[in-house]
Image (tube, rainbow, N blue to C red):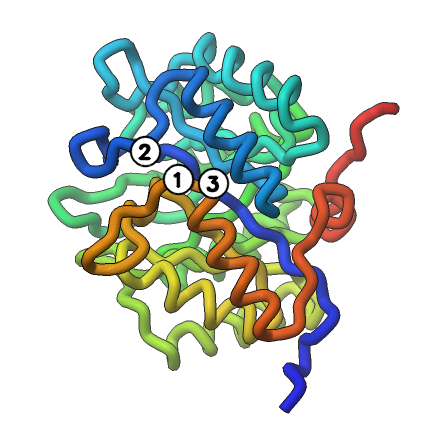
Amino acid sequence: MTNPHAGKPCIICVAITGSLPTKENNPAVPITISEQVESTHEAFEAGASIAHCHVRDDEGKPTSDPERFARLKEGLEKHCPGLIVQLSTGGRSGAGQARGGMLPLRPDMASLTTGSNNFPTRVYENPPDLIDWLAAEMLKYDVKPELECFDLSHIIKAHEMQQKGQIKGTPYVQFVMGVKNAMPADRDVFDYYIHTVRRLFGPDAPWCAAGIGPQQIVLNDWAVASGGHARTGLEDNVRLDRDRLAPSNAALVRRVVEICDRYERPVASWREARDILGLRQPAG
């Protein structure tokens, strides 16, 4: 039976590094700027049109250092022309307004979580005043937020912010499932998330899904089959399966491409991805 979403381009986002994975977990995890650029270039050629980016310090620890983000952004724009660069404002890399110190670099996108939730060993704190400040900075520098939603309330909050003008245009919501102590990969919840996005933002509002660890391929399949977009990458999962480490970010991207083929959905080019998300096209 033909998938009802057949023919609809699917955006693939590659989360290249994150804050947690190390070389000890998988030698393919790119840590230095040069490693990140090389790994992203390979993933870009494999079909990714968004790179979700974190940076590390000289000891390999997560940081929000704007200078490092600037060097990474410059390298990606040089070697992956057209790629959508999405910088993380996540809470493992800094505290308070330091989390948004890279927004004046004017990346295409940045992550924005609109509420707090539990993580495996801590609370992922996103207090309302910080959310408001990050959203204001994104408006100021024309950065489109990707709403990373770990809970239904985060989607509701994103709608409230849109209604107040804190988020411009149609929000791009990403469901994150499979984080220990947060929302598991639950199909009924996933379907209700989709229902909620369509109810609040319209039937054609774009959305994405990310699964953590072994749930990555599960969420990839659900998202592609359901007409959404897919996130993959070594940030979320360092393995191909229980017995094999992923050899690269590109290998995980190619796995999503295979899922797209199975559901008769073309992989979105970077130009198509920019059009779907309402992003500016590069000059030239």
Upstream in the sequence, badge 2 or badge 1?
A: 2
Assess disc 3: are there few (<14), some (14-19) or many (≥20) residues with their C-alpha within 10 Å of its C-alpha: many
The CA span between labels 1 and 3 is: 26 Å
- Mark nearest the camera among 1 and 3 is 1
Find disc 1 in the rendering and name its residue.
248
Residue 82 quadrant: top right
**228 or 168, which lies in front?**
228
Find disc 2 in the rendering and name its residue.
28
Upstream in the sequence, badge 2 or badge 3?
A: 2
**What is the quadrant of the C terminus in the image?**
top right
**93 or 153, which lies in front?**
93
Q: Residue at x 77, y 43 (%)?
A: 271
Q: Residue at x 21, y 51 (%)?
A: 118
**What is the quadrant of the N terminus in the image?**
bottom right
Residue type at the position of mark 3: Leu
Residue type at the position of mark 2: Ala
Residue type at the position of mark 1: Ser
Q: Residue at x 61, y 47 (%)?
A: 47
User: Which residue in the rendered view is the most extreme toward the bottom?
Assistant: 1
Assess disc 2: are there few (<14), some (14-19) or many (≥20) residues with their C-alpha within 10 Å of its C-alpha: many
Note whether 104 is above or below 258 in the view shown: above
Residue 241 quadrant: bottom left
User: Which residue in the rendered view is the most extreme toward the right?
Assistant: 284
Note whether 43 is above or below 80 in the view shown: below
Q: Residue 91 location, x and y as percent?
A: 31, 33
Dot 1: element = loop
Find disc 3 in the rendering and name its residue.
112
